Image (cartoon, rainbow, N blue to C red):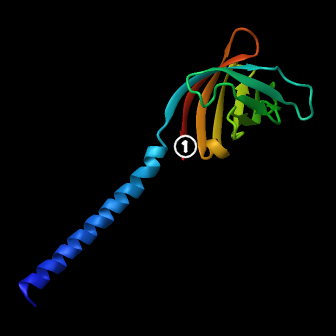
Amino acid sequence: MSIQVRSLRSLRHIVALGAVVALLTVLGSSPALGAEAKPFTAVKLCSGLLGTVPQTQTCLITESSTDLLLGGTVHYQDIVFSATAPGTTIDHLTSPVLFTAVDAAGSTATGQCTFFIAGINKGTGHCEYWTGTRRLREFHAAMAVGTLPPAHTFSLTGSYWFG
């Protein structure tokens, strides 16, 4: 085999290897870019517990550092009151939540929140969202919840990402 033929074969292998490396780099970095967490703060004003069965509550996002949340509603769908330890006083509530954005598509996100109503953690909570629809498809968020004056007003501090 001539030197020219061997050189061309070697060059083809190098080009093919380079193409594979480039493709893996693009595929590997795209999800990472989409999953970049973005911080946010928000304030929600809630209706107070509604006398429904199951018990529900609706909150309006009145302030937000991101347009994604501003004006949206959070609906607590099935509030369950519990005690941290068996035989102790009820100290927290947990509920599946549905966030509805104000966009024309009617985008939603689902998750769960826990809020402490008694004990050492009183007035604090945590919410996580793990899926969504339309513009909130693949929406994820994790946030700390705190109380603010006046009654039924809460702070949200956390991060959100897609993917």
Number of residue marks: 1
Residue 112, image x and y in percent? 70, 37
At 81% from the left edge and 20% from the top edge, which residue is drawn? 47
Q: In the current view of this chain or complex, which residue is farthest to the front?
A: 104
Task: Judge left or right: residue 74 versus residue 19.
Answer: right
Judge whether residue 18 can be spotted in this image: yes
Residue under pointer 1: 162
The extreme left residue here reads 3
Between residues 135 and 97, which one lies in front from this camera angle? 135
Q: Is residue 63 left or right of residue 3?
A: right
* 151 to 49, vertically: above or below: above
Q: Residue furthest top?
A: 150
Q: Residue 74, how many percent across, how many down?
A: 73, 30
Residue found at x 60% / y 31% = 68
User: Can you say which quadrant of the picture contains the N terminus?
Assistant: bottom left
**Image spot of residue 46 (x, y percent):** 77, 20
The spot of residue 52 in percent (x, y) is 92, 30
The answer to whether residue 118 is visible is: no
Seen as rendered, the residue at the extreme bottom is: 1
Q: Look at 82% across and 33% down and name the residue there.
A: 80
Q: Above or below — where is 44 with respect to 159?
A: above
- Seen in the picture, residue 50 relative to 132 is either above or below; the reply is above
- At mark 1, the secondary structure is strand
The front one of 156 and 89 is 156
Up/down of 61 relative to 10, above or below? above
Q: Would you call the spot at circle 1 few (<14 residues within 10 Å), some (14-19), or many (20 or more)?
A: many
Q: Is 157 left or right of 96, judged from the image as shown?
A: left
The quarter of the displayed image where residue 76 is located: top right
Q: Write the residue at 71% across / 31% down.
A: 114
Q: Which amino acid does label 1 sit on?
A: Phe
